[in-house]
Amino acid sequence: MTTVRNLLEAKPSATNYSVASTDTVLQAVKIMVDAHIGAVLVKENEKIIGIYTERDYLRKGEYEGRSAKDTLIKDVMVRKMITVGYDTSLEQCMALMRQYNIRHLPVVEDDHLVGLVSMRDVMAAVLDDKDIEIRGLENYIMGSGFQS
Amino acid sequence: MTTVRNLLEAKPSATNYSVASTDTVLQAVKIMVDAHIGAVLVKENEKIIGIYTERDYLRKGEYEGRSAKDTLIKDVMVRKMITVGYDTSLEQCMALMRQYNIRHLPVVEDDHLVGLVSMRDVMAAVLDDKDIEIRGLENYIMGSGFQS
């Protein structure tokens, strides 16, 4: 069973971008645009306390009358994060993403953030898994002289 | 092989939201937030001429000094759309989404827009397909007295 651990190992160079809770939304947007990502984690006293995504920017920005340069991340971030651990399976990740309609899951181990997985990461890996499973079953059928 | 046609048939009630090219970004954002969607199509003289997504809002909004209420959609939309047809397979959709790093594919038949599929739609359907395929292979093994 593929887990979050395997997923993180597959992209060892990935940086987990974060902003301070007192940064402005404009600073967070700049990081997301420049790094081509859709979410940043929010830190306060070196602890991760929330997440801010492009969906939050859409919903809680100009739509609600806020300007990015005058809004602090702590006022629009999502504090209640759905997190996973190293041993969470990819299927569990997908179920969480579907259930909560979210695209990013912070990975936490021993109270420390160790990664961030996106829907794109998880689904691509699950698809690869399923292909391997299908090839395995096909080989099982072929290799056992099933056609004789 | 599952195609875009099957995918659209599975969600017959889905509305394809659109804005006019002369609408403001704020109007488009309002539609996306209220409908819980991440993209709208852009119409001009009843013809679809582009697409505007929450990623465009992130990249070409306040980040580039534009305000949503003073910016027209035609100035920030994406005109070069990657489209698919009824008979495009889900795997082809995924490949296009990966290649162009996009999450939405308009479906065009005979020069008419007939739908819009998202990465979420496509990947969920592909996963269902793979599960069916795996169950089929398992049944094939079981049903043929393979264990005797």
Image (cartoon, coloured by chain):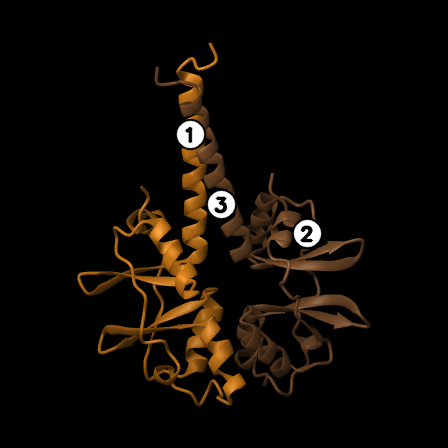
Chain colours: A orange, B brown
Query: In the rendered image of this protein, does residue B65 appear above or below residue B130?
Result: below
Q: Do the residues labelled 2 and 3 touch (CB within 8 Å)?
A: no
Marks 1 and 2 share the same chain: yes
Mark 3 — residue?
Answer: B128
Q: Which is nearer the eye, A105 or A145?
A: A145
* Marked residue nearer the N-terminal end (2 or 3): 2
Left or right of B99 on screen, residue A53: left
Rendered image: mark on residue B84: 2
**Whole-percent x, y for residue B49 in the image:** 75, 67
Tell me if mark 2 has few (under 14), some (14-19) or many (20+) residues whose alpha carbon lies within 10 angstroms of its own.
many
Front disc: 2 or 3? 3
* The image quarter in which residue A37 lies: bottom left
Q: Are marks 1 and 2 in contact (CB under 8 Å)?
A: no
Label 2 residue SS: loop
Tell me if mark 1 has few (under 14), some (14-19) or many (20+) residues whose alpha carbon lies within 10 angstroms of its own.
some
Left or right of B57 on screen, residue A32: left
Rendered image: mark on residue B138: 1
Rendered image: mark on residue B127: none
